[in-house]
Amino acid sequence: MNKATRKAVIAGNWKMNKTPSETTALINEMKPLVAGADCDVVLCVPYIDIPAAVAAAEGSNIKIGAENVHFKASGAYTGEVSVDMLKESGVEYVVIGHSERRQYFGETDQTVNLRTLAAVNGGLKAIVCVGETLEQRELGYTETLLKYQTKMALTNVTAEQLKNVIIAYEPVWAIGTGVTATADQADEGNGYVRAAIAEAYGAEVAETVTVQYGGSMNAGNAAELVSKVNVDGGLIGGASLKAADFSVIVKAASEG
Ligand code: 13P
């Protein structure tokens, strides 16, 4: 990563794991282990766990995020949660367009863009996920797809608002599979994302945007991944459910 121009961010994505009481216990365990980190530390948790997470993280360097948000301000959208609801609950970040939401819940590039706009207009920091499937990679579409997803997600986002956007490159084939992209593949994918941002906003702006890698990032491979110039931290699934492993990743990003 390049700490001279941008911030390293390690974010956990708990997905559908942990009850509220388990949330309190895990964050209490993590707090002393990540205190004093030289990177931003975020935990994105299920909606129902947010009050427990915010209370447990209070006074620490851990920021709390949600795993999704609806793009409308309010209304007849049963089961959905708005930006204002999250903000009032103490949430600062939100994951948008995770591949699991694209795969299982009908998320499209258009709705990713609407959610991103709602988040940045409402004062949340968006962690926007992009990534290719194995089939798309094997067909040679990785660069085209990553640039397309990145530009679609950022449509109508201003350069000023981009300061509150993180892009997470998460190759779908590396998520939850134990198959991590090599550090060079991660750097290349993140580089395509940065190139897309440069095409849309200019190279100088692109140099300031935090681009994370995600997909089977763990205590054993984090240091090598974040040693790459385009890898500004990570979005961590499974390893963010274990305090010791997560803290090793935070340490790697702090020292990288
Ligand atoms: P894993 O770290 O479990 O592969 O998940 C990555 C991810 O999807 C984070 O959003």
Image (cartoon, rainbow, N blue to C red):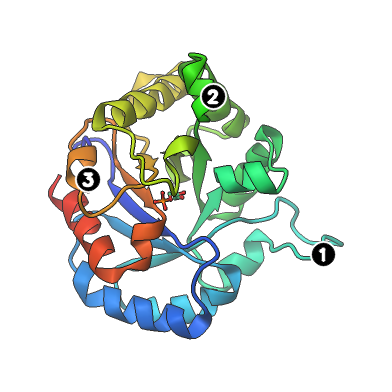
Left or right: where 112 falls relative to 17: right
Give the SS element for disc 2.
helix
Q: Residue at x 53, y 30 (%)?
A: 133
Work out whether 82 lies above or below 215: below
Give the SS element for disc 3.
loop
Q: Foreground: 14 or 36?
A: 14
Q: Residues within 10 Å of mark 1 (few under 14, many from 20)?
A: few
Residue 98 appears at what percent x and percent y? 55, 46
Q: Residue at x 44, y 78 (%)?
A: 23
- Residue 167: which quarter of the image? top left
Disc 3 target residue: 221
For marks 1 and 2, the one nearer the N-term is: 1
Q: How many angstroms separate mark 1 from mark 3 (CA)? A: 41 Å
Q: Tell me the number on the disc at residue 17.
A: none
Disc 1 target residue: 78
Work out whether 211 lies above or below 199: below
- What is the residue that sits farthest to the left in this orientation? 255
Q: Quadrant of the C terminus?
A: top left
Asked whether the viewer can see residue 82, the reply is yes
Is the distance from the Cβ of mark 2 to the nearest ligand 1 atom less than 8 Å? no
Q: Foreground: 20 or 181?
A: 181
Q: Residue at x 21, y 49 (%)?
A: 253
Which amino acid type is shown beneath numbered disc 2? Glu
Which amino acid type is shown beneath numbered disc 1? Thr
Q: How many angstroms separate mark 3 from mark 2 (CA)? A: 24 Å
Q: Residues within 10 Å of mark 2 (few under 14, many from 20)?
A: few
Q: Tell me the number on the disc at residue 135.
A: 2
Left or right: where 42 falls relative to 233: right
Q: Foreground: 58 or 169?
A: 169
